[in-house]
Amino acid sequence: MLKVAERMNRLGTESAFEVLAKAKNLEAQGNHVIHLEIGQPDFPTPTHLCEAAFRAMKEGYTGYGPAAGLLEFREVVAEWIATTRRIDVHPDEVAVTPGAKPLIFFTIMALVEAGDEVIYPNPGFPVYESVINFVGAKAVPLPLREEVEFRFRIDDLIDSISERTRLLILNSPHNPTGGLLQAEDLDAIAHLANKHDFYVLADEIYSGMVYDGQHQSILAFPGMKARTILIDGHSKTYAMTGWRLGYGVAPKPIIEHIVRLMINSNSCTCSFTQIAGMEALKGSQDCVQQMVAEFKRRRDAIVDGLNAIPGISCLKPAGAFYVFPNVQQLPLSADALADYLLYDAGVALLSGTAFGQFGEGYLRLSYANSLENIQEALQRIQDAIQKLKNSIKN
């Protein structure tokens, strides 16, 4: 019998991939499934970025590179962050990783001891809670509330802080709700971080996808450059999910520990991918603007369509490419409803509980699919829910 380390029992997973596997199994049986479960842009990587990577391969960028990332790429990232977050950044304050996700792991591994407390958004990206538990820390959920557009109340944050608080995780724009933190939220968070001496992990991977309002970063608030580990990358904004290109911005002493973790895990990030990443940041942003405009069109359609279904209500998200409709008026739990819609309607989506305890009563749908498929999915959902109600009446 296989015996694994006890800590593996504390490591979770991502339900999106489990639902994807179920959906693929249904498709293998001849069923047509509409995929609204995976958080991946359905756009191809822009051609000029593929061409930049190919040129880099031909120029020899195919061997090991520096564990921190190519200096020329870190210089471009530092300039990009300085421009977009309005604060000076040095290339030595940048670390490049194969995707942004390793930076969640590295930051928690580097800063958090067993027994420390980490406050994280709930519902939220499941990897946050998973890694906190893995290192033996206490995961403290911070509820995101529909009545404040899926932000959190500052009073709830204050109540969550203790003398053991080591780290606060922020995600704005937010997965799974599409919520966006406002300047007054960030100002209050900065005050609390400075007062109580904790770090902030700012996951800003959706920073390029804001429809209403403006993305603002905690990094630029007073005293926060010394306390913030900012995460961003190319997966979402440039439709480069499979390229695995992310970066972190943090004080140099923290970056040095992240680089040590890189050396001990991945060695380095693919060099020709970084060359393509340079082209993405330095070149025209027209491709991003076109993609975001299309996502906004889909967002409006899916929100209107969900709100037209009796028993469902849905806020209009300010960013990312997810909606998080309230289904508390329907006669099934979120988990049961998600399964029902998959098997009865052929629509793959996620239960809100895939993102934590405060996701009960909600579903998450990704609108990274064509408008035609979204409209078909909405009709299938409406028909399935009507069928469910009729079966209960009878």
Image: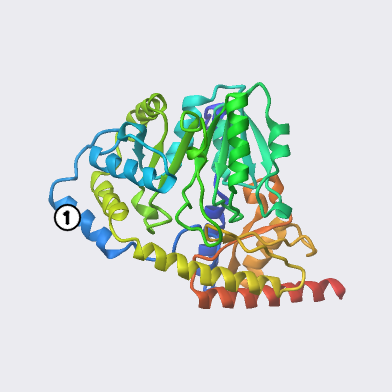
Which image quarter holds the C terminus? Answer: bottom right
At 77% from the left and 68% from the top, the residue drawn is 311
* Circle 1: element type: helix
Spot occupied by residue 168 in the image (x, y as percentages of width and height) = 58, 34
Q: By what rule are the colours in the image chosen?
A: rainbow
Spot occupied by residue 77 in the image (x, y as percentages of width and height) = 33, 43
At 28% from the left and 40% from the top, the residue drawn is 75
Image quadrant where residue 62 sits: top left
Q: Nearer the viewer, residue 149 or 68?
A: 149
Spot occupied by residue 18 in the image (x, y as percentages of width and height) = 55, 53
Q: Residues within 10 Å of mark 1 (few under 14, many from 20)?
A: some
Q: Nearer the viewer, residue 167 or 58?
A: 167
Asked whether, in this view, residue 373 is left or right of residue 355, the answer is left
Q: How many numbered marks have been drawn onto this rendered protein structure?
A: 1
Asked whether, in this view, residue 38 is left or right of residue 57, the answer is right
Residue 42 shows up from this direction: no
Q: On screen, 330 above or below 126?
A: below
Q: Which residue is mark 1?
A: 55
Residue 352 shows up from this direction: yes
Spot occupied by residue 156 in the image (x, y as percentages of width and height) = 72, 38
Q: On screen, 214 above or below 115?
A: below
Looking at the image, the residue that sits furthest to the left is 59
Asked whether, in this view, residue 87 is left or right of residue 223, the answer is left
Asked whether, in this view, residue 226 is left or right of residue 68, the answer is right
Which image quarter holds the N terminus? Answer: top right
At 64% from the left and 59% from the top, the residue drawn is 324
Q: On screen, 17 above or below 3?
A: below
Question: Which kind of residue does numbered mark 1 sit on?
Answer: Arg
At 51% from the left and 58% from the top, the residue drawn is 210
Q: Nearer the viewer, residue 43 or 338?
A: 43
